[in-house]
Amino acid sequence: MFEEILIKNIKVPESHRIVSYLRNGGYTALPEALKHSGETIIQMVKDSGLRGRGGAGFPTGLKWSFIPKDPTLQKYLCCNADEGEPGTFKDREIIEKDPHLLLEGMTIASYAIGASKAYIYIRGEFEFGAGRLEGAIQEAYDKGFLGKKILGSGFDLDIYVHRGYGAYICGEETALLESIEGYRGQPRIKPPFPALKGLYKKPTVINNVETLSCVPAIISKGPGWFSKIGPEKSPGPKLFCISGHVNRPGVYELPMGTPLRDIIYDHAGGIRGGRKVKAVIPGGVSAPMLTVKDIDIAMDFDSLAAKGSMLGSGAVVVMDDTTCIVKIAYIVNKFFSHESCGKCTPCREGTTWLTKVLKRLEYGEGREGDLELLDSLCGNIFGRTFCPLGDGAVMALRGAMKNFRDEFEYHAKNKTCMV
Amino acid sequence: MAVMLKDTTLEKIRRAMKCYPDKRSACMSALRIAQLDDPENRLTEQAFRHIADLLDMTPVSLHEMAKFYTMYNLEPVGKYHIQVCANISCSLLGAEHIIRHIERILNIKVGETTQDNKFTLSTVECLGSCGTAPMMQINQEYYEDLTEDKVGSILDSLE
Ligand SMILES: Cc1cc2nc3c(=O)[nH]c(=O)nc-3n(C[C@H](O)[C@H](O)[C@H](O)COP(=O)(O)O)c2cc1C
Ligand code: FES
């Protein structure tokens, strides 16, 4: 029987308060962690097999181990709570309803890497969630879980909330650092990687909300418990956020590797009005769409990568057979073009041009050669941009055009939609 | 300096400055606080100058910040800023109808403000509330699982 760890606390009223969290066994992993060395904690996280839940799936323990051991250096932990990938609404669940789970995870992570300051970068629209975090931080200070000499140990930590103010690109980790420092959110060149030169040029770890929220359970239940959930190479519990044409959209905590079919039909209650699935975006709009043929795929990093898509943020967007894929491609591309930070030309100009062509296809003004134009624009963006935003735009569009090319052709030829 | 920021606003900005090792890092907080305290819900030239002084920045660099981050308003915004999500999950569940419906009720188009300055209507990208689509944000508040009827009564309830 699968045991929830990420959203197990949220069903009770006032779940965001520290009393609630303590009653549910919260803040027991932290004292346990403080008995060990930071290095031991890092090893436990490595052994658990935890991979980043923000999109890229990078092994978390390995990322932490890149932080220099020099105790005289200031180090930082940044929690990525930007939750910007369209279709994603999972971190918000933890932030609003169980903020102490995140704070406990952040405190253990900070201890492991030797950081005495941590920031939570939250998107500005989540004002309610930011308030919840600030309230929780205050409660944690009052109880001695934050501040100086935490729980009588030699470890100090301060956590601050930094609000973004409307820029998807700030979810990219180096743009996020720029933004905290008070600059426009434009990605930095890597290397140097943040582990060596991150926030204020100091060693920095950036992790997603869900990633950090897995940490307390890894300490209290053990890395072996965690690594046995789901597939060997991407284990653990995972939050899937399902939206679109399903009967019960929402956030579901399931073992990594749960088949897409089960997520849609068993958990999300199937398709509205008993209609048929046409396409599914499995991991936020940057992830190439799948078709109904792929419905039995296991939802984990490697299985989706093998199919040419990705797990990304775990945002599953389900589209039924009334959906016009050209319209979806236009909406998604418009998003990328709007959010391009403007730093590099292929992304800035390329996504603008893509959107222009998609718009005319969608509005019945397509021209002959438009599909080839889209193909060639994609080729000129992909792999040539400063950060992965432009690649995301191309992968999304290529995914749509590969699976539903006939719909694009129909729009170009007949100036109207075939659905 | 003509119109200064209020003392209460300054107090909040000073508190935000304590979160960072340098002054500049507080600029996003400072701009946000100034905008929220502004009667027209926007950033004025005076606010830029005053914050620039406080943080040892130039008004121009603050302006650049405000232009980059879409939640900062450089133009006056109505008392209620209605922002309807037009991204993927909301579109799949009828965001367009919601937008058209609000346009009809308020007799304005997206991007416009009503003559009495009460409502401004905008469309925005995904607000991280896709499981309760379609949705909109009015000022700081989220309104979810919208229907045309629901939107009508929400707008009626705003003073
Ligand atoms: C354009 C872009 C947007 C991103 N947005 C987010 C986001 O909103 N939240 C997030 O956690 N990661 C986001 N990421 C991934 C981060 O760069 C980074 O990989 C992640 O925060 C690392 O944390 P993890 O290892 O715990 O996944 C984004 C990446 C790119 C390229
Ligand atoms: S798509 Fe509308 S809130 Fe995400």
Image (cartoon, coloured by chain):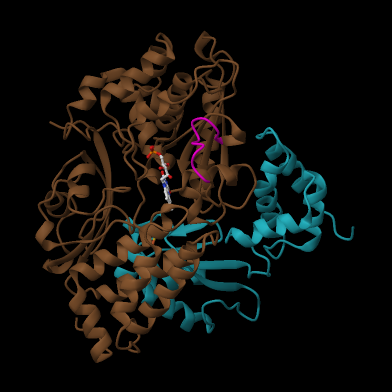
Chain colours: A brown, B cyan
In the image shown, does A40 or A87 lie closer to the viewer? A40
Q: Is residue B116 above or below residue A134?
A: below
In the image shown, does A175 or A368 lie closer to the viewer? A368
Q: What residue is rendered at 16% in x and 72% in y? A: A321
State which region is magenta: A189-198
Q: What residue is rendered at 40% in x and 10% in y? A: A36
In the image shown, does A385 or A274 lie closer to the viewer? A385
For residue A37, what is the image quadrant?
Answer: top left
Residue A249 image position (x, y, % from top left)? 26, 55
Q: Is residue A213 magenta?
A: no
Residue B145 image position (x, y, % from top left)? 35, 62
- Residue A281 in view of the camera: yes
Position of the C terminus of chain A, as image quadrant, is bottom left
Q: What residue is rendered at 73% in x and 39% in y? A: B23
For residue B77, what is the image quadrant?
Answer: bottom right
Residue A44 image position (x, y, % from top left)? 31, 19
